[in-house]
Amino acid sequence: MHTLYRFFAAFCSLLMATSPVLAQDSTATSPWNFSAGADIYYAYETNQPDERDRLYTTQAARHNEFNLNWGYLQADYRSKKVRGTMALHTGTYAQFNYAAEPNDLYRLIAEAHAGVNLGGSFWLDAGIIPSHVGYESTFSIFNEIYTRALMAEGSPYFSTGVQLSGDLGETLSFKAVLVNGWQNIAETNEAKSVGLALNFRPNDRLELNYGNYFGNESLLEDETLYRFFQHTYARYNFSEVFHAVVSFDLGSQQLLGASGEKTTETWYTGMVLGEYRPREHYSLAFRAELFNDPQQIIFATPNQQAFEIAGFSLGFNYFPAENAALRFES
């Protein structure tokens, strides 16, 4: 506990990113939209990690070097009955998040999904889709602060399968998924996983979200080791210039003991985040978080130590244009 806590307390970095997005097709009535982005960073960590790889993160993952966190090219198609997205990417984000994929070509795919309208607001999409759980976006420019919380790093950024989504009223929407597993493209066992997300927006100030995931995470063909994960957040806009987010995750995982017996272990994480934007081109953001994973279900540690972390981030953001950001964070 002491070593890990000291590591995060000592962490200090300068991070920069520019992300041009939504470079729209010049034909306003075209169903096609093309976009591209670049997320470039420099990170310095006083802990001097071995081989320059920063531990426990896939964002700005390299120490003391300028690098590409995420570069992408994306094409979107939208009509009344059909929609689809194809996005290719590269960078250290892709390198670390897709490291377990057995096919090198899979690691180039950020999104690849197509959907059909089932009537009204209901859509059925299939393919490699963004995760249905989580608050912080994969796109750095859409987040309050540059890096991701351990909460985001410890839950899926993407899934592979089918998703049913739609509105259940003027203030409530949902997503239901059937996917291969916990952030993977290639299947790792014979089972499939399910998940549900509900988003409630009763007014312009408040947003409430709940999501879950249930599936077999065993890598053994004849064994089942179930994982149940729950994610929730509340966002409140106190004014036009300040909003805050409170989020909490709780997960449980069956583990197989040395003698073959099964135990169920848990992990949990919490986050408080806020952004103050008094001017269009400037903002200040903060994040406080904790992550408790005593059995290293999500984060493996040296010498089998419990993963118990408290962290704090403070960031200054400059937005020279609507689709660009220069960000500094410690």
Image (cartoon, rainbow, N blue to C red):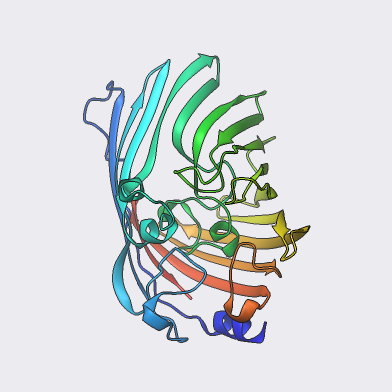
Relative to 67, 313 lies left or right? right
Q: Residue at x 55, y 83 (%)?
A: 7
In the depicted view, which residue is nearer to us: 243 or 64? Answer: 64
Image vertical order of residue 128 relative to residue 285, above or below: above
Quarter of the image for the N terminus: give it. Answer: bottom right
**Viewer-proximal residue among 323 and 34:** 34
Front position in the image: 211 or 282: 211
Question: Residue visible at 39% across and 59% down?
Answer: 93
* Residue occupying image coordinates x 31% and y 23%: 31
Q: Is residue 70 left or right of residue 186?
A: left
Does residue 230 show up? no
- x, y percent for residue 234: 68, 49
**Image location of residue 38, percent across then percent down:** 29, 55
Q: Is residue 62 left or right of residue 274?
A: left
Residue beneath the point at 78% across and 58% down = 261
The answer to whether one can see residue 257 in this image is yes
- Does residue 87 appear left or right of residue 162 in this picture? left
Q: Position of residue 41 (x, y in %)?
A: 34, 68
Q: Looking at the picture, how far across and down is residue 233, in whole percent?
A: 67, 50
Q: Residue furthest left?
A: 26
